[in-house]
Amino acid sequence: MSNNSGFSLELVEKYELLGEKRFRFRIKGTSLYINVSAENEDEALKKAMQMVKELELDKLVTEIFKK
C-alpha cells in the first residue's frame, strides 16, 4: 500500500478492542507503527496515511531513505 510520497504502509494486524475494529500498519523499511480505528481496511489505510502526513513522518522517512 504505497503512495506518491515515497513510503508505503504494510498492514500487520487487524483486531478488535472493546468492540472497536483496530488496524495496525507499519511504515515499510522502518520500525514505525500506526494504529487506527476504522470500519474497514480501506478506511483504516486512509486514516493511517493522513496521520503519517499530519505528523510529517513521510518527510522524515523520505529523508532517511535518501541517506
Image (cartoon, rainbow, N blue to C red):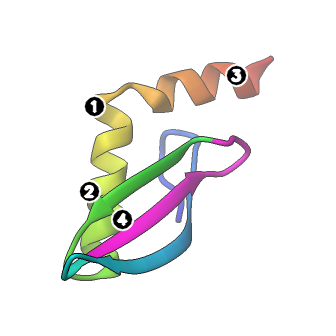
**Image quadrant containing the C terminus:** top right
| Residues marked 4 and 2 touching at CB (< 8 Å) | yes
What is the C-alpha distance between the residues marked 3 and 1? 18 Å
Q: Name the residue under label 4.
A: 45
Q: Which amino acid does label 1 sit on?
A: Glu
Could you classify mark 4 by the number of other residues whose Cα lies within 10 Å: few (under 14), some (14-19), or many (20 or more)? Answer: many
Return the mark for residue 54.
1
User: In the rendered image of this protein, does residue 26 appear above or below residue 21?
Assistant: above
Q: What residue type is labelled 2?
A: Lys
| Residues marked 3 and 1 touching at CB (< 8 Å) | no
Residue furthest to the right: 67
The mark nearer the N terminus, 2 or 1, is: 2
The mark nearer the N terminus, 4 or 3, is: 4
Q: Name the residue under label 2.
A: 47
The mark nearer the N terminus, 2 or 3, is: 2
Task: Name the element at disc 2.
Answer: helix
